[in-house]
Amino acid sequence: MIQNVNDSKMDTKRHHILNAAVEVFSRFGYRKTSMQDVADAAGMSRAALYLYFKNKDDLFRVLMERHHATATAEAEAGFAQTAPFERRLSAGLKAFVLSAMAPVQSSPYGQELFEANNTLAEDLNVATAARLQQLTQATIADAIEAGEISLGKVAVTPTLLAELIFCAIDGIKKGSDGLDQIEERIDALVRIVASATGSAG
Amino acid sequence: MIQNVNDSKMDTKRHHILNAAVEVFSRFGYRKTSMQDVADAAGMSRAALYLYFKNKDDLFRVLMERHHATATAEAEAGFAQTAPFERRLSAGLKAFVLSAMAPVQSSPYGQELFEANNTLAEDLNVATAARLQQLTQATIADAIEAGEISLGKVAVTPTLLAELIFCAIDGIKKGSDGLDQIEERIDALVRIVASATGSAG
């Protein structure tokens, strides 16, 4: 019981530090941020900070874990809505992409933070992308099961359609100019998929 | 007149060298290939080779120019076929992607050659992608004009649809495992676009 209380205090403190770290990283970028900067922003000593995080890489990785968990939870909520297929697909994909990209877009050091993420947390990126593709596939399978859509006309499996949607999402994330264009393109992608599977309108 | 004959001889010789260079680069990769290797493969002296190409980077860039021109011409021929929209779109996109990726896929040094291309000829990549997107957009506009397809149901412009197709193609090129999967995914993409625009079957 006492252990649980301590765990929970530890968690609260870690969240407090991570919130401070988000601020500092987006203001100074990855390279220029020091553990001292994070400690200052969190209102604690550098020594105390090291009780919670081994080093800057460790702190950043835990930050990315939290970030991925949030983006995934938002996508899950979008996919799980009580709404037609087109709305569920759109909500899930947009929640994920916009939540995942928002910090990169809003910081002047976005590109550097994006690269730090790719270097320090590539395995998390891969796992999260796989999870989201799985959720998309399940959403498609559910809609088929419910008679909402049919893949017969386009002769693809739910797996292939989900893969293709994620290839498109990947290209959209990399090739678009800002969040507005990303959103416009995801909307168009979803309308095309809905129309092709007979669920549009 | 004599000038033209010389130009044409020069061109023939350059093509002969470039064909030899393709062989050598795909066997040894970019870094390990020397101008001497290319000269040997072309059956000429290293000194003579330098009359045609300034250095290895220059030779590689000219090789990439020829490669892009070939891929673009093959795509143009595909798009220009006398065939229904779905077949034209499929032929154009596949001709381009498969022609562009074939050398990378068939060499054990594919990744290294791909990176050399990105470093030495990024401007060509961008220009070729823009040209292909333009051809796709023109193919879509022609099909609308001819009453073959309609974008009303999906509420996108020909520009947005062409952009979206190229985002998907980009994701497919990067996220697929070999040429067979790339082809399977492009086929599925084209069926979905055709179905959504009312031209399937």
Image (tube, coloured by chain):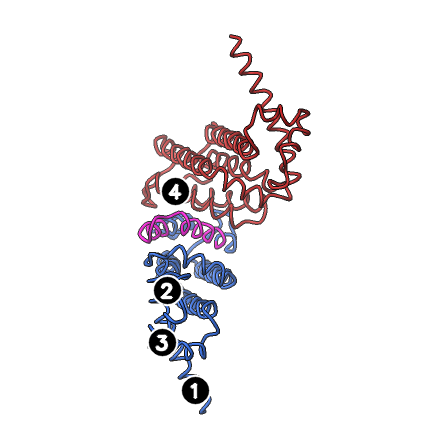
Chain colours: A blue, B red
Q: Indicate the quadrant containing the N terminus of chain A: top left, top right, bottom left or bottom right.
A: bottom left
Is the same chain shared between marks 4 and 1?
Answer: no
Q: Which residue is mark 3?
A: A16
User: Which chain does the residue under circle 1 lie in?
Assistant: A
- Which residue is labeled 2 in the image? A25
- Residue under label 1: A6
Same subunit under labels 2 and 3?
yes
Distance (Cα) linking label 1 and label 2:
28 Å
The quarter holding residue A30 reads bottom left
Q: Amino acid at mark 3?
A: His
Left or right side of B37 for A74? left
Q: Chain letter of disc 4?
A: B
Seen from the viewer's position, the closer of residues B156 and A113 is A113
Of tags 1 and 2, which is closer to the observer?
2
Q: Kindly identify the amino acid type of the residue bearing the numbered disc 2.
A: Phe
The verdict on residue A42 being magenta is no
Are dots 4 and 3 on a single chain?
A: no
| Residue at 52%, 62% in the rendered image | A123
The residue to which callout 4 is attached is B163
Decide which of B152, B119 is in the foreground and name it. Answer: B119
What percent of the width, then of the height, locates residue A26?
35, 62
Residue interval drawn in magenta: A162-187
Q: Is residue A185 left or right of residue B186?
A: left
Residue that sits furthest to the bottom in the current view: A2
Q: Do marks 1 and 2 share a chain?
A: yes
Marks 2 and 3 sit apart, C-alpha to C-alpha, by 14 Å
CB atoms at circles 2 and 3 under 8 Å apart?
no
From mark 4 to mark 3, how far is it between C-alphas? Answer: 42 Å
Q: Residues within 10 Å of mark 2 (few under 14, many from 20)?
A: many
